[in-house]
């Protein structure tokens, strides 16, 4: 039975037609995937359903009756819940307080609400105290807490915007199980994702949007066809790096690196990590959430002080005291969370792109704005950032373009070693391919690339070697010639992993 | 698809973009509206009495020391901090100046650097407390406000110290005579230029250039906009934080002699609540207390708005009580004008 | 780090305490001759007038060797602070208590407590809303305002335009000094107050106000400042505009400090000021009498002295304590 019908939905922003006459129906217990490049209108459509926008054109029916949804409260009343890509949790409150935020009884009954949230968490396979503060939870955990929050309400339609972007594969499995459980109970799920391989597994139907309009839908997932529908042109090979190319001299050598953890922030300790990256080589770092991937890259970038071990870069001792020192030695880090760690969102493309390399443009102690501008423009154009100019505010760019600005910023420092943490998270297929192509060309140009990713197909396609981390230890290393499988990598990633945590 | 409000391919007419660029370089355009309005009201109600060199010089001169404080406070606000101690720092610097003059007969050109060092010292402590001890700047500078005021009162024995010091012949000593050029009303440089006004403008120009043209300036904006991103981009966040507080203190020290000369004496209470005027000027000029947003040009305009408003109201003999009401309202209006999104909210548009 | 801060803080505390007189030392040492202990709670040390009062009180107390004045407690303009200070003195069982209240109402209860504890209380300068005290000593601001007004009438026999710089509007001295002045100038209807504004007792507030008045008004003949700093702030503005010679300036307070009103009269900047008596000498005398069982007047209203060019030097010498106490 049809539970949701959206009819001829349209929405304009100043100067842009974001959606035009899009219709969508979803049946009870069905999983419909929305697919489209960045800016195709998926989030706009779902935000209308969730009541984020007050004004729009068209009509929404829920359970056969017209539903006037003009505020998040309306949406909640009609049984629509949405898990946003940017998680909406209050860091200083506990898990329970977040789940029931805005729906607390006047007099708080701690015991029963905590019992209820503990039950919800268990249902999602999360072994966390309901009293734990959100800020102490990892991103994957927060994602699942958002799911718990949605489930705590009486949902008929659950919208998930990129729910797996921060999850490792094992966690994704857990989420799928939850989704199947929900659909069995008759809940309709609308699922937005960039990961085509996921849709194959979870979606009953895939609806494709492009430039704010409906393109078509398929019940069978045919990768190439869907990609073609999304981008409007055949994309060719998705991961362009077919061959490893010749690796050069050893660039980075890490020996016995240990970093103490930090209990307050949930930072994973590193235990005697040794690795090397050669010039012209792409080395992957795989692992589940909390395996220490980000910690490893950050330590190489001088963010954390190692307690033991040594590093050398280009044959010389390398002991960075701060990111500043790392940058001076030609190291760059494309951080995991581009909004929180990489960009000053309120400022311009030029400001962000020039920030770490200002030294290059100094003349008589002043920044030579003209030469800076020229260099930034060249780099930004080379990466095909879509914006009206370098004075455009970064916060208003799409995710893919923001990531390109981050890359431009680091390329301007002319690094010899580039560390990348989830470089393609939350980015549409087109931009993803461009970033992969960039990685290949960087390696071909003799740079060393160390990339951490939770997407195994990406690592398998791009990397010359893959290191697997588990609880801060390297548990396996695979070279391209070994043709490792996802299963083999996962097994290494879960070696010595306690069964209780996911 | 990560941002909801962003157009997929942003394309603005180039003309509009250039216009916005010019304005963003010179501060919030809305602040100018306020300034123009106040000038218009002044001219309409008082004509030549308002619009003449003497009156305008007097008005700007009376606010100059607070304006200089506002520049320092703007630096701190840009990094996402706040400096409540500048009024006290100005107080102790003005006391230092008066004592150097009366007890040690130092030349004015010796007094200014000494006062700047005194101010910078306390400013450095503010920065060190904020950056190293991780004390919130509001708390740290609130404490400094109290500590420095106490020291000021202790060294002065709660007695104001005059700067018009007569020698044995009954005339002002040469040092005291020269000190008057720092701003005692009626004493001008080269017979025409009133030093407080000149000093305020020069400070604004210098710090405008520092913020827009130097690496340090960029780093200040980066620290305020996103400290994590700044650190990961190689910015020494600790050093920048300490530097802005030190500079803010140094500017307060620089303004001290001006304040002493203006009243021809250093009062142990001098500068009290000046920090609020300084913050108001920065905020009216478009600075965001969240950090990363604001300009010196905006602060300059904000300072002009505050002092000219005071002047226009005074010339029109508006009662003191209503002046307070009007000044408070102006701050709110100015801040609302900076926020086009608020208008959108009132029009019922979407904010996501 | 924390330890270092604690140590530093202790050092500062110790230094601050050491700079004051040692705590109450009662009759324990000698035994034969009783030493009286007196506490004084001052409303705000930071006003030059009160700083002067403190100095004078400490000076005049040294005349009575059997009386020890405890370190002066500064209420810093806060009634709550002052109440607890008074209560502290009561707990310490001082032999006499001097209070300069910040405001009448909040201090009334505390003064009554002292009274019930049988501690003689001398109210200095400002009033409280109870009769339960031993003596009140203070100046008469209405009288001083009146004297200033009479001086204005004398200076402007043909009438003229007066501007008035007021203290903080809600302060009692401001209200009284305004009242007395207006009563006195009513004697000559041709004298008009053409403008008045709140200068908050501050010099730097008065200067821009005077600048605005000079721009607005063609003719200003006399400036009446509720205290000397405001009158002097106006003088600076007039001097800058080249009009200082045509205008006369009258202030109040007449402090004998280098930056004070008596010097300003000597220099010809003010044509007159009126000494607002500190009452320190009278307070010391009264305390001595009370402690030795003599009768004192319950209400001692002090007069004022007009400072003119003729008597300025002499008065300065009389009240200047910088070399002594």
Image: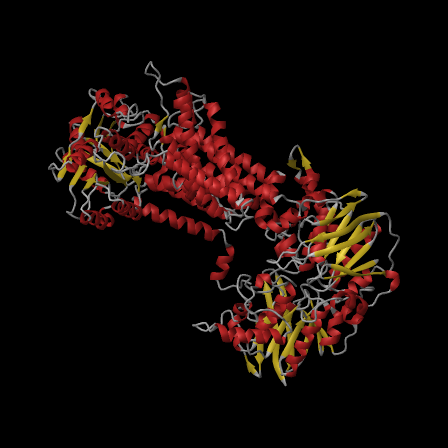
Relative to A287, is A444 above or below?
A: above
Most distant residue in the top direction: B169
Image vertical order of residue A345 relative to residue A22, above or below: above
Where residue A342 appears, as percent x and y from the top left, is 65, 52
Q: Give the quadrant of residue A36.
A: bottom right
Nearer to the camera, A293 or C288: C288
- Picture residue at 78% right of the left edge, 45% below the top: A313
- Which one is nearer the viewer's eye here, A394 or A324? A324
The residue depicted at 47 percent of the width and 61 percent of the height is: B346
C222 or C311: nearer the viewer:
C311
Residue A282 lies in quadrant: bottom right
Image quarter of the C terminus of chain B: bottom right
Q: Position of residue A242 (x, y in %)?
A: 86, 60
Question: Which x, y percent locates residue B159?
Answer: 33, 31
Colour scheme employed for the rendering of this structure: secondary structure
Which residue is found at the position 24% from the left and 20% from the top?
A: C313
Q: Quadrant of the N terminus of chain B?
A: bottom right
Q: Judge whether residue C226 can be spotted in this image.
A: no
Instruction: Say if A177 sits above or below A301 in the image.
Output: below
Residue C258 falls left or right of residue C142: right
Q: Is residue A221 left or right of residue B338?
A: right
Q: Is residue A28 visible?
A: yes
Measuring from the top left, give residue C204's x and y in whole percent: 35, 34
Residue reaching furthest bottom?
A: A1
Q: In terms of image quadrants, where is residue B99?
A: top left
For this view, does B333 lie left or right of residue A344?
Answer: left
Total marks shown come to 0
């Amino acid at each position: 039975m049809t539970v949701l019908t959206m009819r001829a939905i349209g929405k304009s922003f100043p100067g842009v037609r974001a959606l035009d006459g899009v219709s969508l129906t979803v049946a009870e217990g069905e999983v419909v995937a929305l697919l489209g490049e960045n800016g195709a209108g998926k989030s706009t459509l779902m935000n209308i359903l969730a009541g984020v926008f007050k004004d729009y054109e068209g009509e929404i029916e829920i359970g056969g009756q017209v539903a006037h949804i003009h505020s998040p409260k309306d949406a909640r009343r009609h049984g629509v819940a949405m898990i946003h890509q940017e998680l909406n949790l209050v860091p200083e409150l506990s898990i329970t307080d977040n789940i029931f935020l805005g729906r607390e009884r006047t007099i708080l009954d701690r015991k029963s609400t905590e019992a209820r949230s503990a039950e919800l968490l268990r249902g999602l396979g999360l072994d966390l105290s309901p009293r734990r503060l959100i800020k102490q939870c990892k991103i994957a955990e927060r994602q699942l807490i958002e799911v718990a929050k949605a489930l705590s309400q009486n949902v008929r339609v659950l919208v998930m915007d990129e729910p797996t972007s921060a999850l490792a594969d094992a966690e994704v499995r857990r989420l799928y199980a939850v989704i199947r459980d929900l659909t069995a109970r008759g809940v309709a799920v609308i699922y937005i994702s960039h990961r085509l391989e996921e849709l194959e597994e979870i979606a009953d139907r895939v609806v494709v949007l492009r430039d704010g309009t409906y393109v078509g839908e398929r019940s069978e997932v045919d990768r190439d066809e869907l990609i073609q529908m999304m981008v409007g042109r055949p994309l060719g090979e998705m991961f362009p790096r077919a061959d490893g190319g010749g690796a050069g001299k050893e660039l980075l050598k890490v020996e016995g690196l240990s970093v103490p953890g930090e209990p307050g922030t949930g930072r994973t300790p590193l235990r005697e990590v040794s690795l090397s990256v050669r010039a012209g080589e792409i080395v992957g770092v795989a692992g589940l959430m909390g395996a220490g991937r980000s910690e490893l890259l950050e330590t190489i970038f001088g963010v954390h002080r190692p307690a033991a071990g040594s590093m050398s870069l280009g044959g010389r001792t390398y002991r960075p005291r701060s990111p500043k020192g790392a940058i001076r030695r030609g190291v760059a880090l494309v951080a995991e969370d581009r909004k929180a760690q990489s960009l000053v969102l309120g400022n311009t493309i030029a400001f962000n792109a020039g920030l770490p390399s200002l030294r290059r443009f100094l003349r008589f102690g002043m920044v030579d704005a003209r030469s800076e501008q020229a260099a930034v423009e060249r780099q930004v154009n080379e990466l095909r950032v879509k914006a009206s100019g370098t004075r455009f505010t970064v916060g208003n760019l799409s995710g893919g373009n923001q990531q390109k600005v981050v890359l431009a910023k680091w390329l301007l420092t002319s690094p010899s070693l580039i560390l990348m943490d989830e470089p393609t998270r939350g980015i549409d297929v087109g931009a993803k391919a461009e970033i992969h192509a960039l990685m290949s060309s960087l390696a071909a140009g003799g740079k060393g690339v160390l990339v951490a990713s939770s997407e195994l197909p990406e690592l398998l396609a791009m990397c010359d070697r893959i290191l697997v981390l588990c609880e801060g230890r390297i548990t396996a290393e695979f070279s391209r010639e070994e043709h490792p499988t996802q299963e083999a990598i996962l097994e290494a990633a879960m070696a010595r992993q306690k069964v209780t945590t996911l | 698809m990560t941002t909801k409000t962003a157009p997929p391919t942003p394309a603005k007419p180039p003309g509009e973009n250039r216009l916005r660029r010019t304005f963003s370089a010179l501060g919030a355009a809305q602040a100018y509206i306020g300034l123009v309005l106040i000038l218009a009201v002044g001219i309409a109600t008082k004509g030549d009495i308002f619009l003449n060199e003497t009156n305008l010089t007097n008005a700007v001169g009376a606010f100059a020391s607070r304006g200089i404080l506002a520049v320092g406070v703007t630096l701190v606000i840009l990094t996402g901090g706040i400096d409540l101690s500048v009024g006290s720092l100005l107080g102790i610097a003005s006391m230092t100046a008066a004592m150097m003059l009366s007890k040690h007969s130092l030349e004015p050109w010796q007094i200014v650097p000494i006062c700047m060092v005194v101010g910078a010292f306390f400013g450095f402590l503010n920065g060190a407390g904020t950056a190293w001890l991780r004390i919130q700047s509001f708390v740290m500078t609130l404490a400094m406000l109290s500590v420095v005021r106490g020291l000021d009162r202790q060294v002065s024995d709660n007695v104001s110290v005059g700067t018009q010091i007569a020698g044995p012949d009954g005339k002002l000593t040469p040092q005291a005579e020269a000190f008057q050029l720092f701003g005692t009303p009626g004493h001008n440089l080269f017979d025409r230029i009133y030093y407080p006004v000149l000093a305020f403008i020069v400070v604004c120009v210098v710090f405008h250039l520092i913020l827009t043209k130097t690496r340090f300036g960029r780093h200040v904006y980066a620290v305020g906009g996103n400290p994590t991103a700044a650190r990961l981009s190689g910015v020494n966040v600790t050093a920048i934080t300490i530097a802005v507080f030190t500079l803010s203190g140094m500017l307060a020290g620089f303004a001290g002699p001006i304040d002493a000369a203006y009243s021809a004496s250093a009062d142990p209470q001098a500068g009290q609540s000046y920090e609020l005027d300084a913050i108001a000027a920065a905020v009216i000029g478009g600075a965001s207390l969240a950090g990363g947003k604001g300009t010196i040009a905006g602060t300059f305009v904000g300072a002009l708005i505050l002092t000219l408003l005071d002047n226009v109201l005074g010339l029109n003999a508006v009662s003191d009580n209503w002046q307070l009401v009007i000044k408070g309202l102006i701050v709110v209006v100015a801040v609302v004008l900076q926020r086009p999104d608020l208008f959108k909210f009132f029009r019922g548009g979407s904010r996501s | 780090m924390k330890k270092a801060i604690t140590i530093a803080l202790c050092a500062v505390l110790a230094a601050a305490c050491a700079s004051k007189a040692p705590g109450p030392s009662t009759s324990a040492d000698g035994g034969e001759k009783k030493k009286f202990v007196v506490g004084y709670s001052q409303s705000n040390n930071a006003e030059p007038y009160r700083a002067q009062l403190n100095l004078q009180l400490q000076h005049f107390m040294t005349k009575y060797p059997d009386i020890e004045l405890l370190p002066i407690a500064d209420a810093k303009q806060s009634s709550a602070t002052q109440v607890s200070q008074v209560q502290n003195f009561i707990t310490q069982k001082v032999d006499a208590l001097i209070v300069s209240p910040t405001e009448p109402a909040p201090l009334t209860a505390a003064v009554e407590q002292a009274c019930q504890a049988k501690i003689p209380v001398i109210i200095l300068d400002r009033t409280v809303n109870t009769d339960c005290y031993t003596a009140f000593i203070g100046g008469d601001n209405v009288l001083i305002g009146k004297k200033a007004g009479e001086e204005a009438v004398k200076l402007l026999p043909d009438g003229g335009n007066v501007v008035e710089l007021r203290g903080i509007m809600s302060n009692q001295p401001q209200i009284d000094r305004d009242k007395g002045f207006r009563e006195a100038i009513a004697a000559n209807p041709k004298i008009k107050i053409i403008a008045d504004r709140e200068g908050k007792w501050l010099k730097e507030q008065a200067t821009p106000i005077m600048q605005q008045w000079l721009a607005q008004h063609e003719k200003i003949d006399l400036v009446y400042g509720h205290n000397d700093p405001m009158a002097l702030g106006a003088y600076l503005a007039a001097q800058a505009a080249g009009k200082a010679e045509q205008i006369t300036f009258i202030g109040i307070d007449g402090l004998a400090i280098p930056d004070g009103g008596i010097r300003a009269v000597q220099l010809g900047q003010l044509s007159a000021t009126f000494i607002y008596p500190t009452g320190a000498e009278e307070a010391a005398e009264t305390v001595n009498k009370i402690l030795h069982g003599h009768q004192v007047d319950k209400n001692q209203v002090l007069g004022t002295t007009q400072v003119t060019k003729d008597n300025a030097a002499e008065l300065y010498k009389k009240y200047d304590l910088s070399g002594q106490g």
